[in-house]
Image (spheres, helix red, strand yellow):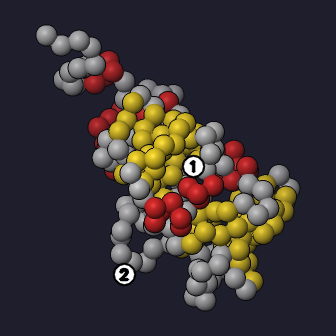
């Protein structure tokens, strides 16, 4: 587990193909790796990876074919900057929110504009994730814990203060940049809890739908009101 508070900006030192998947070597300046051991977890752009080697101020981690397919790690090139955070401990301050490091989908940066001293950034999430994103709720973007300012369909806005801008990958983002998204854990578990016994049904039968919600007494207020 992580907090979504980025410890340092690292950079990709090497990309080594390994039989269909990939080994990353990451420089981690400013991160104290003295108590890091093989097998520990480090979040790289929001993806929980296992440390497989340590050398000076850098570490190596293997990225499976599955992770390459559902995250942006396969887009990385040598020298690219990456957000880094070590796994939290029981005495870590939880300054962000609980983050698992398990990416739910890849979003895209739609627009950026100044907002006083901050920058308002709009992203578009994959449609299936839209129901988990709520105004004033939490979302993780490339491992950074952020508050959702506004939601419009599958698009949402966040405000990036200068401190966050300078210490994370936001400083290299451009329109069209692909980012790893992780929605709030509570939203995902709440959906499953609402299903009750239907959650065990295979083939998509155990999913929330408008018709099922209506049967349970949840009125649909998306249409015009009197």
SS assignment at label 2: loop
**Residue at the front extreme, as displayed:** 116
- Whether residue 173 is visible, yes or no, is yes
Q: Determine the residue positioned at 32% across, 41% down.
A: 135
Q: Earlier in the sequence, mark 2 or mark 1?
A: 2
Residue 181, horizontal then vertical, whole percent: 52, 47
**Residue at the bottom extreme, as displayed:** 34
- Whether residue 202 is visible, yes or no, is no
Residue 96, horizontal then vertical, whole percent: 38, 63
**Residue at the left extreme, as displayed:** 226
Residue 125, horizontal then vertical, whole percent: 51, 37
The residue that label 2 is drawn on is 91
Q: Determine the residue positioned at 13% across, 10% down.
A: 226
| CB within 8 Å, label 2 to label 1 | no
Alpha carbons under labels 2 and 1: distance apart:
27 Å
Q: Determine the residue positioned at 21% across, 25% down.
A: 218
Q: Is residue 104 left or right of residue 156?
A: right
Indicate which disc residue 180 carries.
1
Residue 187, horizontal then vertical, whole percent: 35, 45
Q: Nearer the viewer, residue 158 or 226?
A: 158
Q: Is residue 136 left or right of residue 116?
A: left
Q: Nearer the viewer, residue 131 or 157?
A: 157
Q: Determine the residue positioned at 65% across, 75% down.
A: 28
The crowd level at tag 1 (other Cα within 10 Å; few <14, some 14-19, many 20+) is many
Indicate which disc residue 120 carries.
none
Q: Is residue 19 left or right of residue 185?
A: right
- From what the image shows, is residue 88 above or below residue 166? below
Residue 52 is drawn in which quadrant?
Answer: bottom right
- From what the image shows, is residue 91 above or below residue 196? below
SS assignment at label 1: strand
């Amino acid at each position: 587990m992580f907090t979504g508070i980025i410890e340092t900006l690292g950079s990709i030192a090497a990309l080594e193909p390994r039989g269909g998947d990939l080994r990353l070597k990451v420089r981690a300046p400013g991160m104290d790796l003295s108590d890091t051991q093989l097998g520990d977890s480090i979040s790289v752009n929001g993806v929980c990876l296992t440390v497989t080697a340590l050398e000076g101020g850098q570490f190596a981690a293997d990225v499976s074919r599955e992770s390459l397919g559902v995250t942006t790690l396969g887009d990385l090139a040598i020298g690219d900057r990456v957000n880094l955070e070590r796994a939290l401990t029981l005495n870590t301050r939880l300054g962000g929110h609980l983050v698992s490091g398990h990416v739910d989908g890849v979003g895209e940066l739609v627009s950026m504009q100044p907002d006083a001293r901050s920058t308002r950034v709009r992203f578009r999430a994959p449609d299936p994730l839209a129901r988990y994103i709520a105004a004033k709720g939490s979302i993780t973007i490339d491992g950074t814990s952020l508050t959702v300012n506004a939601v419009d369909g599958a698009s949402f806005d966040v405000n990036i203060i200068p401190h966050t801008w300078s210490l994370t990958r936001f400083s290299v983002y451009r329109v069209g940049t692909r980012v790893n998204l992780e929605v709030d854990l509570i939203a995902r578990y709440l959906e499953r809890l609402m299903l009750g016994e239907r959650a065990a049904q295979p083939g998509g039968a155990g999913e929330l739908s408008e018709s099922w919600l209506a049967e349970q007494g949840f009125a649909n207020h998306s249409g015009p009101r009197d």
